């Protein structure tokens, strides 16, 4: 969307108000008008021809032409990549050309390129054949001439089997006259003994199977000689270099010749005629070398000419692809429009943000003045019962958080947007589980590198993982900052505590601190000013203390976030003028949650402030089992027993309060409306305000009322909330579990790897220990633990937080915009 930055300030809490607009465009100027709207990117067209197939639409021929041009452009792009050339990174700054002119030019370029490729393939095939023929002629001298170069090492496994296996004793009559201990053939021997040979080239990977097949087919009545080819050959199909093997098969008889030729054909072996006379071989070799030299020169000239043509195309290719992509998108959009009764205008409908109405009309007026059309463009707002799309304007910072929310479900139109709160709560809950300011600094450095190279990386085509990492760079930034903050509170730097804010409030009982772990420390000063006292690290009560601290802290965070979710549901109901949901859903939910787990949070805070030794497990369990029993030493404040009984009664009352009134009230309102005593749409969480424009109203108000369905839905919702209040609170204990696991893993790697290696007086052991520690920190703590904490924070937001107020059954606003077109749209 190219004009978004110029628009009025955005409302982050609610989606932009939408309207359904109707456009009436003259046929002769419809193409250019839609092109202007594509540049603006603020109108989502509705398909008015969804009952027609793509081949029944008006502009199907233009779409086919654009698709054919896209195919040609993809062909050019593939050819450029195969040739190892580079595309122009930016579209060429030349005057625009018409689509018809571009179409003719692309057809001419394609024909020329195909012809050049065909000629190059023919020349390359001839060159390969001559090169293979040359190698066969060179190797044939080793097979035929007794020059002593053919060693016994070239005897094959099959040759040995001929002498060993008695089943093939009859083959000696054929092979014995040829064999003089060397495996070569004397000149003129083929005429004297009737022995012939076939020579050629086969792919190296097929040589062994080829030899076995020959041996079995001829029942051993052959002699197979082979040698590796000196030069690899270019495979025309894959355009890769392939290693080959030169072979020569000696045999006798016409039947054997036919079989060998069929096997060569089946294995794709190329056979070449080789004369026995060495003088003729040398003469043919000279002719072949001469022709190879000429072909090399011709091939080089042809490739240079083709590369020059591809370079010329590559300079314009990006511009042409963008042009064709836009034209195809325009005609696809025009196919969504209908003709009016006069067949002179195209009628279209689309969703548009209300704030952009003035700008859309202004742009269309400008176009009308430029086009100097006799028929004006009509733009007016329509009434609709269809639910509008959801549109949140985002920037580089908020886009990643909005994507996190949209991955669960797109907000219903005008529903409260969880992304506003996710900007803070998501990285903070991640940091609670990942709290270590040493690891946080490592994440911060990575985030800063991605942000510093934002322009460069944003213009490059990245892999899927890097694209995801780059898109979440600002999420990573806040995650690292909050991790540093929580790490300072936990007083952990790669699991090592530091006296950052002064000296510890504790000291050892004796001067040597020899019994610090068994006897403990004594408090001698004021409480450590910020975070966890470093003296807790390594003490005998470290684990019980941190367990208690992080577990209670997780409950406090969980209850706070769930209360926030219920409060947002109140603002949703208030925004949609739904008093029923406020009275019979919001109020009992707040009462039920806080009478139980809000009370538990209060007990935790009181216990922290007073230093009481009360057992909160006992208090909460016996609040249900024995509400009138005396609390004894677990009493934290005056009147606690009476308050617990009142809270328990209120929580029990809140359950039927959520379940029964709302369905019966809706039934009564429906009955009164049906009898004519009341009018208007029933107010539920699925309805929209009467103050909204007609295009923004939800159609559910006109649906038939079904009391049993409404009651069952309310019963499920109530049971889910009651059970979820317990399970969701327990789910927040993952903050405690993952934080403790991360801390313990860091301690293990630090003490059992780094300190253990440093205990040896050996430089190599120090180096190995440091390398293992760095590897474990980078791949386990900074990658696996980061991913684990990220997924758990994601679950807490999607399930525990958003289910209190978020429907997530809307659909995104996807306007027709050239800026959103990608390579996949080709």
Image (cartoon, rainbow, N blue to C red):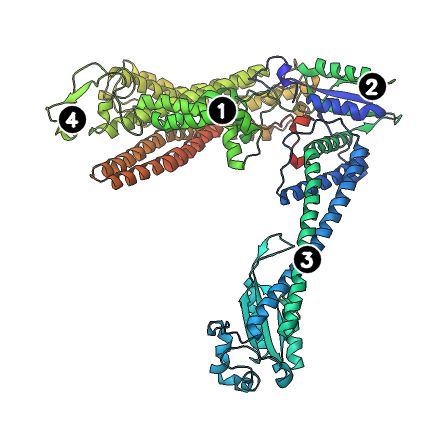
Place of residue 816 in the rendered image (x, y in percent of width and height, measured from the top left): 70, 26
Q: Is residue 66 visible?
A: yes
Reply above or below: 515 against 576: below
Q: How many marks?
A: 4
Q: CA distance from mark 2 to mark 3?
A: 57 Å
- Label for residue 125? 3
Residue 701 relative to residue 622: left or right? right
Q: Earlier in the sequence, mark 4 or mark 3?
A: 3
Foreground disc of the pair 2, 3: 3
Upstream in sequence: badge 1 or badge 2: 2
Horizontal and vertical percent position of residue 684? 59, 21
Give the residue pinned by disc 1.
451
Contact (Cβ within 8 Å) of mark 4 with mark 2: no
Gap in angstroms between the C-alphas marked 4 and 1: 47 Å
Of residues 47 and 709, which is closer to you in this image? Answer: 47
Report the side of 617 relative to 447 (left or right): left
Residue holding disc 2: 371
In the rendering, at what x and y percent does residue 43 appear?
Answer: 70, 22
Earlier residue among tags 4 and 1: 1
Please report contact status of discs 2 and 3: CB closer than 8 Å, yes or no.
no
Sooner in the amino-acid sequence: mark 4 or mark 2: 2
Asked whether, in this view, residue 588 is left or right of residue 284, the answer is: left
Closer to the chain start, of discs 2 and 3, is 3
N-terminal label among 1 and 3: 3
Tell me whether the residue at label 1 lies in contact with that at label 2, contact meaning CB atoms closer than 8 angstroms. no
The quarter of the picture where residue 342 lies is top right
Q: Residue 285 at x, y = what percent?
A: 64, 65
Separation (CA) of disc 1 from disc 2 = 44 Å
Give the crowd class for mark 4: few <14, some 14-19, many >=20 residues within 10 Å. some
Q: Quadrant of residue 131?
A: bottom right
Circle on res. 520: 4
């Amino acid at each position: 969307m190219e004009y978004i930055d110029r628009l009025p300030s955005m409302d982050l809490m609610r989606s932009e108000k939408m309207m359904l607009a109707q456009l009436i465009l003259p046929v002769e100027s419809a193409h250019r008008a839609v092109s202007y709207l594509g540049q603006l990117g603020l109108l989502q067209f509705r398909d008015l021809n969804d009952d027609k197939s793509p081949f029944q639409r008006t502009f199907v021929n233009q779409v086919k032409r654009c698709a054919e041009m896209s195919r040609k452009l993809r062909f050019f792009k593939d050819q450029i990549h195969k040739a190892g050339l580079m595309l122009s990174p930016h579209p060429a700054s030349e005057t625009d050309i018409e689509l018809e002119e571009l179409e003719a030019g692309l057809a001419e370029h394609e024909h020329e390129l195909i012809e050049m490729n065909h000629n190059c393939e023919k020349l390359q095939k001839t060159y390969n054949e001559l090169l293979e023929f040359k190698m066969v002629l060179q190797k044939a001298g080793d097979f035929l001439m007794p020059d002593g170069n053919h060693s016994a090492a070239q005897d094959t496994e099959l040759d040995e089997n001929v002498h060993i296996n008695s089943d093939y004793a009859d083959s000696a009559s054929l092979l014995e006259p040829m064999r003089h201990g060397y495996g070569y053939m004397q000149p003129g021997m083929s005429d004297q003994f009737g022995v012939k040979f076939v020579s050629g080239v086969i792919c190296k990977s097929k040589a062994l199977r080829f030899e076995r097949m020959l041996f079995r087919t001829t029942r051993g009545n052959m002699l197979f000689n082979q040698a590796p080819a000196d030069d690899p050959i270019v495979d025309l199909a894959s355009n890769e270099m392939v290693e080959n093997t030169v072979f020569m098969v000696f045999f006798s008889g016409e039947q054997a010749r036919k079989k060998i030729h069929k096997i060569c054909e089946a294995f794709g072996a190329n056979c070449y005629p080789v004369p026995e006379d060495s003088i003729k071989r040398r003469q043919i070799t000279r002719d072949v070398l001469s022709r190879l030299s000429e072909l090399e020169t011709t091939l080089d000239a042809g490739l240079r000419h083709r590369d020059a043509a591809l370079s010329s195309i590559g300079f314009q290719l990006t511009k042409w692809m963008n042009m064709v992509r836009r034209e195809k998108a325009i005609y696809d959009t025009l196919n969504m429009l209908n003709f009016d009764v006069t067949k002179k205008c195209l009628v279209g409908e689309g969703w548009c943000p209300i704030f952009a109405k003035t700008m859309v009309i202004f742009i269309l007026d400008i176009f009308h003045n430029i086009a100097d059309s006799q028929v004006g463009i009509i733009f007016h707002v329509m009434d609709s019962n269809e639910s509008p799309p959801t549109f949140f304007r985002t920037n580089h910072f908020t886009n990643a958080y909005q994507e996190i929310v949209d991955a669960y479900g797109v907000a219903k139109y005008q529903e409260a947007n969880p992304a506003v709160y996710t900007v803070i709560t998501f990285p903070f809950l991640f940091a609670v589980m990942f709290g270590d300011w040493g690891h946080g600094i490592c994440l911060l450095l990575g985030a800063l590198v991605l942000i510093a190279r934002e322009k460069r990386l944003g213009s490059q085509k990245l892999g899927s993982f890097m694209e995801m990492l780059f898109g979440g760079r600002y999420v990573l930034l806040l995650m690292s900052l909050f991790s540093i903050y929580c790490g300072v509170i936990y007083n952990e730097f790669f699991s090592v505590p530091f006296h950052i804010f002064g000296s510890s409030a504790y000291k050892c009982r004796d001067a040597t601190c020899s019994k610090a772990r068994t006897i403990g420390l004594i408090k001698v000063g004021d409480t450590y000013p910020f975070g966890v006292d470093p003296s807790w690290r390594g003490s005998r009560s470290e684990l019980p203390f941190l367990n208690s601290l992080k577990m209670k802290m997780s409950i406090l965070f969980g209850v706070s976030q769930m209360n926030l979710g219920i409060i947002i549901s109140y603002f949703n109901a208030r925004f949609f003028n739904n008093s029923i949901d406020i009275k019979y859903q919001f109020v009992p939910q707040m009462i039920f949650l806080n009478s139980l787990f809000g009370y538990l949070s209060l007990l935790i805070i009181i216990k922290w402030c007073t230093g009481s030794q009360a057992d909160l497990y006992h208090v909460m369990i016996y609040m249900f089992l024995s509400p009138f029993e005396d609390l004894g030493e677990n009493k934290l404040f005056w009147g606690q027993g009476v308050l617990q009984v009142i809270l328990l009664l209120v929580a029990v009352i809140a359950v039927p309060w959520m379940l029964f009134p709302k369905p019966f009230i809706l039934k009564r309102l429906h009955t009164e409306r049906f009898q004519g005593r009341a009018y208007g749409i029933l107010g539920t969480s699925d309805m929209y305000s009467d103050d909204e424009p007609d295009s923004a109203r939800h159609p559910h108000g006109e649906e038939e009322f079904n009391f049993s369905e409404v009651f069952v839905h309310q019963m499920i919702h109530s049971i889910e909330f009651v059970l979820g209040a317990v399970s969701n609170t327990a789910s927040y204990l993952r903050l405690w579990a993952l934080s403790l696991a991360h801390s313990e893993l860091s301690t293990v790697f630090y003490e059992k790897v780094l300190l253990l290696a440093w205990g040896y007086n050996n430089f190599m052991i120090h180096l190995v220990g440091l390398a293992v520690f760095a590897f474990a920190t980078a791949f386990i703590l900074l990658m696996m633990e980061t991913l684990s904490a990220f997924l758990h924070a994601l679950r807490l937001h999607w399930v525990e937080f958003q289910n209190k107020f978020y429907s997530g059954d809307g659909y995104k606003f996807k306007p027709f915009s050239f800026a959103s077109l990608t390579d996949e749209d080709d």
